[in-house]
Amino acid sequence: METRMTWDQIRKKYPGMWVRLEQVQWETEGSPDIASAVVAKSTKSRPTTQDLKDAMDGICAMEYIEESNIFHTGYITA
Amino acid sequence: MQQYTFKTSKSNTRPVIRIYENLSAVIDTGADIPVCSDANVLIERLGANEISIPGKVIETVGISGSVRGRIFRVKGFELGPLIYPELNFFVPDDPTMSSTFLLSASMFNGLICEVNFKDHYFRITLLDDEQTVRLVSFEKDGEHICWDVRKSE
């Protein structure tokens, strides 16, 4: 069964992963921020070309969930 | 004067916008070269041709070191009011990007651009004497890439 999740729920559940999001509800028109969506697929590897083409067509959105403790160039240590 | 405004992400510290429906793109003012993570998207959807020479090593140097990849030319890339008749994209051999596209500083050379981190938008202002058609050419210098940006005539 497809479960709609909020963006915060998605971020907590899929850190460090690419997610294919369907039935996306954006926060506002034209915003890149997602309010909620259904996660159709999650993967550690990068998106397939088809996933990206679907995103270009508005069929889905492909988002990478950054792990909150990782900077672009390294790790934060305690 | 003409202005075009993209909404930027509130949940991302970087200026991330949406292009082509649901693809994310980072406005990377620290980058010289537009980058795309997927060559097939450029080829199959945007009609790009590879212009790098097979077997010839192309490298760019960024904050995380040297990256190898290939160069593809897209004809007619559009971003808001801006039209790039020919825009070259670097495609890393092993992309580790969190967005499909990085839109580089060279794409906005000579323009008034505003990244507003408080109200979350990226705004391009075109003065009356500015062209919407932008030419971004490049030339290779050894194994590295140099960029020369000029307005269309």
Image (tube, grey):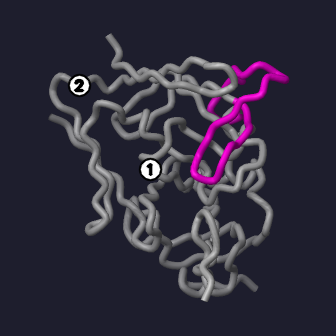
What residue is disc 2 on? B130
Q: Given the image, what chain letter belongs to the residue carrying mark 2?
A: B
Mark 2: give few (<14), some (14-19) or many (20+) Cα within 10 Å.
some
Q: Which residue is more in the foreground, B80 or A65? A: A65
**In terms of sequence position, does the residue under pointer 1 or pointer 2 come before the other?**
1
Residue nearest the observer in this picture, A72 or A26: A72
Is residue B145 rendered to the left or right of residue B1?
Answer: right
Res B27 label: 1
Q: Residue at x 62, y 83 (%)?
A: A77
Q: Amino acid at mark 1?
A: Ile
The range drawn in magenta is B44-70
Residue found at x 44% / y 50%:
B27
Q: Which amino acid type corresponds to the residue marked 2 in the rendered image?
A: Glu
- Asked if residue B52 is positioned above or below residue B7 in the image, the reply reads above
- Is B13 left, or right, of B60 in this rendering? left
As drawn, B127 above or below B113:
above
Drawn side of residue B23 relative to residue B97, left or right: left
Q: Secondary structure at mark 2?
A: loop
Q: Does the segment drawn in magenta span residue B62?
A: yes
The one of A33 and B139 positioned closer to us in this rendering: B139
Is label 1 or label 2 in front?
1
> Residue B92's image quarter?
top right
Q: Residue A35's x, y, as percent? A: 48, 77
